[in-house]
Image (cartoon, rainbow, N blue to C red):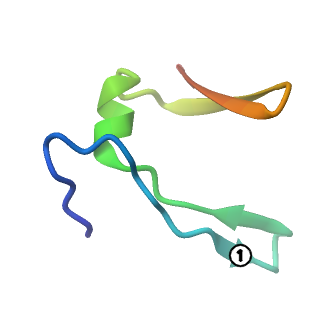
Amino acid sequence: MTSWAKDAKEFTVSIIPNEARATNYSYIPKPILKMLGNPKRLKFVIKDRHVEVRGSD
């Protein structure tokens, strides 16, 4: 598993296609999950030309 630097501010992750389910997977970096309060779910909100990510239980 990837180890992230403590002061990292940018995270690049791979997008893994799953053709059988017509979707994609990606691993969310632990520092991001920790910052969001270790949520059970993530919500992606499209706002204009940006995407906002929110943690949700």
Q: Amino acid at mark 1?
A: Pro
Task: Name the residue rendered at 21%, 55% in the picture.
Answer: 4
**Front-lying residue, 21 or 55:** 55
**Front-lying residue, 10 or 13:** 10
Task: Name the residue rendered at 25%, 45% in the picture.
Answer: 8
Density class for disc 1 (Cα within 10 Å; few <14, some 14-19, many ≥20) is few
**Residue 22: percent from the left, percent from the top?**
86, 69
Instruction: Classify the position of the N terminus by image quarter.
Output: bottom left
Secondary structure under badge 1? strand
**Residue 6: percent from the left, percent from the top?**
13, 43
Q: Is residue 54 left or right of residue 7?
A: right
Q: Is residue 43 left or right of residue 29?
A: right
Q: How many numbered circles does the render carry? A: 1
**Residue 2: percent from the left, percent from the top?**
26, 67
Q: Residue furthest bottom?
A: 19
Residue 12, quarter of picture: bottom left
Which residue is under mark 1? 17
Task: Name the residue rendered at 48%, 31% in the picture.
Answer: 40
**Residue 14: percent from the left, percent from the top?**
53, 69
Residue 43, quarter of picture: top right
Would you place residue 38 above or below residue 29 in this image?
above
Would you place residue 13 above or below residue 43 in this image?
below
Residue 47, quarter of picture: top right
